[in-house]
Image (cartoon, rainbow, N blue to C red):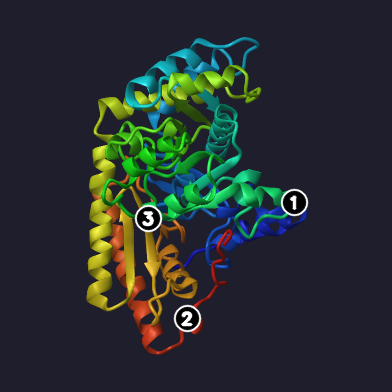
């Protein structure tokens, strides 16, 4: 467990001078982990493992915040990128890959009659919101999800709302997952003002009592559109995303993350009658048709179709999830892996039953020291994760949970913490 993080910390000191917030993504910044114990910079990845700049190796359960669905250095994807690179990256006119990938997406996502590309999932959700406003001639959005969209219309609801005109706050109304009455209340109080209901097909709990279909019925009854934020659920829950897995077809959907195994690509997909609004709505960006990402997407879809990728992720996720929860029960720690095997989160609860960042920090400290890279908010698995990975991870978790139990019994968790308590990106 003796590791050097000298190079990581050296780069971090330089970053304080040149990089605001120390990272391009808040969720990857050192303060989002146990600062002082976690590596700050990674250098390479292979399969399900990553290596930091000091040469330390970790089994990775963050996977670039979700995009690495097949694994790092996955040959079929890397080779597709290399082949396309020989012909070019970005062109002055559309490339046939734009059409080919759109056709492929239309075969696997129920709502995907047409496609518009983006470079991020956030852009895809925001473009869908703009389309819905243009179609309905309304401004307000009803939203339910885990966030992650950095644009004004959503981030105004969070603590990181600096620089955003205050009127945006009046245009977004949040409702609770699996609580159809909270959505009904929004419609009752905002007659003929809701442009769209934007919802993740699932966050960490399964839809109950046909919740998603009720969302669709209620929105359409009120002449509003339904947007599924499938940035996370797309490609992970099933080949056709959450909409196919749960059997509920939205009007529009936003895709991202696993769409191209780490290459920068997102997409708005939807029914033709609604997607045609993009003939006029201004969503236009230079790099949306960039071919390396489209080649990676085409190759990713081929792998998902030809191999048991999604089945493997469900199986390997179940193995870890069940094993972790069994360990925590046996050791007597109120820690639990919740959610779905393909999209999990580890919760550590205090004596009052509240999720505790202090307890989670100690657990993450002890697992990273044993070669396991977890994130406080989400846990992913990939096609490259193996049974051996899970076994090593559970062995590390067993030791970490024992230390956590000891620290809690001694009422001295802070005394065991060698780094800083993790900080949430926003509230």
Label whose residue precedes the other's in the sequence (2 or 3): 3
Residue at image coords 41%, 37%: 221
Residue of label 2: 416
Query: Split into 4 quadrants, where in the image is the N terminus?
Result: bottom left
Relative side of 128 to 353, left or right? right
Q: Is residue 74 above or below residue 61?
A: above
Separation of disc 2 and disc 3 at Cα?
40 Å
- Within 10 angstroms of label 1, few (less than 14), some, or many (20 or more) residues? few
Judging depth in this view, the residue of 111 and 235 nearest the camera is 111
Q: Position of residue 184 (x, y in %)?
A: 43, 50
- Within 10 angstroms of label 3, few (less than 14), some, or many (20 or more) residues? some
Q: Nearer the viewer, mark 1 or mark 3?
A: 3
Q: Position of residue 422 (x, y in %)?
A: 54, 67
Residue of label 3: 179
Q: Position of residue 331 (x, y in %)?
A: 26, 77
Q: Is residue 352 above or below residue 181?
A: below
- Within 10 angstroms of label 2, few (less than 14), some, or many (20 or more) residues? some
Q: Nearer the viewer, mark 2 or mark 1?
A: 1
Residue of label 1: 163
Q: Position of residue 222 (x, y in %)?
A: 45, 38
Judging depth in this view, the residue of 123 and 133 nearest the camera is 133
Relative side of 308 to 281, left or right? left
Label whose residue precedes the other's in the sequence (1 or 3): 1
Residue at image coords 77%, 55%: 17
Q: Quadrant of residue 129?
A: top right
Q: Nearer the viewer, mark 2 or mark 3?
A: 3
Q: Secondary structure at mark 2?
A: helix
Query: Split into 4 quadrants, where in the image is the C terminus?
Result: bottom right
Separation of disc 2 and disc 1 at Cα?
39 Å
Judging depth in this view, the residue of 120 and 303 nearest the camera is 120
Q: Secondary structure at mark 1?
A: loop
Relative side of 341 to 118, left or right? left
């Amino acid at each position: 467990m003796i590791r050097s993080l000298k190079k990581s910390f050296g780069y971090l000191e330089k970053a304080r001078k040149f990089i605001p917030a120390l990272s391009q993504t808040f969720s990857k910044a050192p303060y989002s982990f146990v600062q002082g114990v976690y590596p700050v910079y990674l250098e390479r990845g292979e399969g399900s493992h990553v290596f930091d700049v000091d040469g330390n190796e970790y089994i990775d359960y963050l996977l670039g915040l979700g995009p690495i669905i097949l694994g790092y250095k996955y040959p079929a994807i890397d080779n597709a990128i290399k082949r396309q690179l020989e012909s070019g990256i970005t062109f002055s006119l559309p490339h046939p890959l734009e059409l080919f990938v759109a056709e492929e997406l239309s075969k696997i996502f129920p709502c995907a009659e047409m496609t518009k590309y983006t470079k991020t999932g956030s852009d895809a959700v925001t473009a869908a919101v703009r389309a819905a406003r243009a179609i309905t001639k309304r401004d307000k959005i009803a939203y339910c999800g885990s966030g992650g969209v950095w644009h004004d219309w959503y981030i105004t609801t969070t603590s990181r709302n600096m620089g955003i005109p205050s009127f945006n706050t009046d245009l977004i109304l949040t409702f609770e997952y699996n609580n159809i009455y909270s959505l009904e209340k929004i419609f009752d109080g905002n007659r003929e003002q809701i442009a769209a209901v934007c919802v993740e097909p699932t966050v960490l709990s399964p839809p109950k009592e046909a919740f998603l279909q009720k969302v669709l019925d209620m929105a359409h009854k009120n002449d509003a559109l339904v947007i599924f934020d499938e940035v996370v659920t797309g490609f992970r829950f099933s080949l056709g995303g959450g909409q196919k897995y749960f059997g509920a077809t939205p009007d529009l959907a936003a895709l991202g993350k696993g769409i191209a195994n780490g290459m920068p690509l997102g997409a708005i997909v939807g029914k033709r009658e609604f997607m045609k609004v993009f003939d006029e709505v201004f969503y236009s960006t230079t790099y949306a048709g960039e071919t390396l990402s489209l080649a990676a997407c085409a190759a990713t879809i081929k792998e998902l179709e030809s191999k048991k990728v999604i089945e493997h992720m469900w199986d390997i996720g179940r193995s870890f999830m069940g094993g972790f929860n069994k360990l925590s029960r046996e050791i007597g720690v109120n820690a639990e892996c919740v959610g779905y095997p393909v999209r999990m989160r580890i919760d550590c609860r205090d004596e009052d039953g509240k999720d505790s960042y202090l307890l989670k920090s100690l657990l993450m400290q002890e697992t990273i020291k044993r070669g396991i890279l977890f994130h406080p908010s989400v846990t992913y698995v990939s096609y490259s994760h193996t049974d051996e990975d899970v076994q090593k991870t559970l062995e590390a978790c067993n030791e970490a949970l024992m230390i956590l139990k000891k620290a809690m019994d001694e009422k001295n968790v802070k005394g065991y913490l060698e780094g800083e308590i993790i900080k949430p990106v926003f509230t």
